[in-house]
Structure formats: C-alpha cells, structure tokens
Amino acid sequence: MGSERKPRDQRKRGAGGEARSIWLRPGRTSARGEPPLTRARIGTAAVALLDEDGIDRLTMRRLADRLAVVAPSLYWHVDTKDDVIDLAVDAIFGEVEPPAAGAPDGTAPPDAGWREGVAAVLGTWRAVLLRHPWAAAVPARRKPSIGPHFLAWMEVLQATLVRAGFTGRDLLAATWALHNHVLGSASTQVALDVTDEERDSAQERVRAAADRYPTLAASDYLRDDDWNGTFTAGLDFILDGLEARLARTAAGTAGGAG
C-alpha cells in the first residue's frame, strides 16, 4: 500500500507538533534591560542585510549584530533562518500601502475596471520583488503567504475578483493563476542572469540543431529578454481567459434562469 497522506492539520507542523510558520506562533516580548525587539524590527533589519549581501550571507549572528542584541535574544523571537526570511519578505510587502478597504479595484484609478485593478496589484507585487531580488528567489515553500502585509495585498486582489463576479472555486483558481504568474515571472527574471553574448550563443546552438528544434530556432526564444513585455502580455492572456470565464458563467446562469 502507498504511504498515507498526513491529516491537513499535521502537514505544516514541525517534528514536535509546533506550527512551522512563524505567523502561526505567538510573538514574544524582549527580556528586561534589552533593546525592544519585535518581529517588525527583525524583518526590517533582515531586509537591509539581504539587500546588501543576499540570502547566502544572512546569518543569525550578523542579524543580531545589526539589531545590537546578543544571538540568544534573537533566538527568543525566531527559531530559524527561515523565520527571519518569512519576516523579511512580508516586510517588503509593507513598503507600499495597499488601498483602503472598499477602495475601487486595487491601485488603479477610481473609474478603472477589474482588469486594470488586477494589473495594478500584480504590477506592485512584481516591482517589490524585483526591487529585492533575493525575495523573488525564495522557494515557494518559504513564501510567507500568511504574513499580515502580504495578506493585505491578497485581500485587495481577491476583493477585486469578487467585484468582477468570481466566486467559489473560480475565485480560488483565478487567485492562484494570477499569484503564480507574478511570482513565476519575477523569479525567472532574477534567476536568468545571463549576458547578451550567452543568449546569442545559446540561440545559435539551437539554430544549428533546427532539424530537432525547428520552432525554438524560428522564434528566437533564447534571445528574448523583454521581461516587462512578456509579463504584461502573459497577464493579458490570463485576464482574457478570466473574462471569457465570467461571460460563460453569466450565460449559463441566464440560460438556467430561462
């Protein structure tokens, strides 16, 4: 027999049963006589270090030095480096304030439609990730999807989709399609740090084997570095599909009513 699937409430917990995400664990206050240490301060300091040197050079000792505390004090608030990265990624999503609840369609103009609202939200997310390239490279399993700043932006996105007419499974599928597009676009752009010479050489290699890769050779696929254009066009494809889905749903509802 195959291995049994873990119950939902156990899949995201550590070996001792504790919640793995820092956002699911209660915060702690600093010991008396030490500088006030909060998750917000830790996240801000971590962002500064990560911007300077990247994830590989982030250590708890360097972070403690930046915060002017001893390492044990830091460990009182965070268990692992993953906790620190969770705090840092959520902190960067707090750099831009999301619209107030009830504001029309995200960061788009007040008279904009839902497509413009979605595009504005995703454009903000992408700009944040590209401003902090280390964040775009964080594996999806460590994305702080329940951090307060990220959730505030996700609320804007879903509220925009709900106003457009999405509900139930369609709302969830639309949310994930858009979420995956912006994160995939940013992480790919950061990861594919190659020179024009390398692009040309790679494309010539494909062209030399055009009998095996005729479509890739003809499209100049490996020379494409129009990240902004590709992101925007891909988002339009997704939004076209979502709009068509809304139209089919509305037509089905009208047909059922008739």
Image: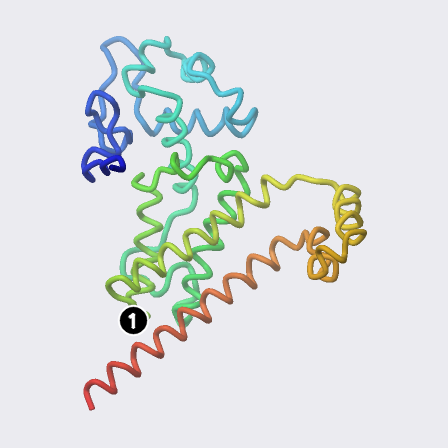
Q: Residue at x 72, y 55 (%)?
A: 212
Q: Position of residue 29 (x, y in %)?
A: 22, 19
Res 224 → quadrant: bottom right
Q: Is residue 148 left or right of residue 115?
A: left
Seen in the picture, residue 102 relative to 183 is either above or below; the reply is: below
Q: Residue at x 24, y 11 (%)?
A: 31
Residue lying furthest bottom: 258
How are the colours assigned in the image? rainbow
Q: Position of residue 140 (x, y in %)?
A: 42, 39
Q: Position of residue 112 (x, y in %)?
A: 42, 70
Q: Pick the quarter of the image with the C terminus.
A: bottom left
Residue that carries the numbered disc 1 in the rendered image: 165
Q: Residue at x 76, y 58 (%)?
A: 211
Q: Position of residue 81 (x, y in %)?
A: 40, 22
Residue lying furthest front: 1
Identity, as a three-letter code, of the amino acid under mark 1: Gly
Res 36 → quadrant: top left
Q: Is residue 55 left or right of residue 200?
A: left
Seen in the picture, residue 2 relative to 182 is either above or below; the reply is: above
Q: Is residue 115 left or right of residue 187?
A: left
Q: Residue at x 27, y 15 (%)?
A: 76
Seen in the picture, residue 257 relative to 183 is either above or below; the reply is: below
Q: Secondary structure at mark 1?
A: loop
Mark 1 Cα shell of 10 Å, populated few (<14), some (14-19), many (≥20): some
Report the front residue among 238 and 66. 238
Q: Pick the quarter of the image with the N terminus.
A: top left
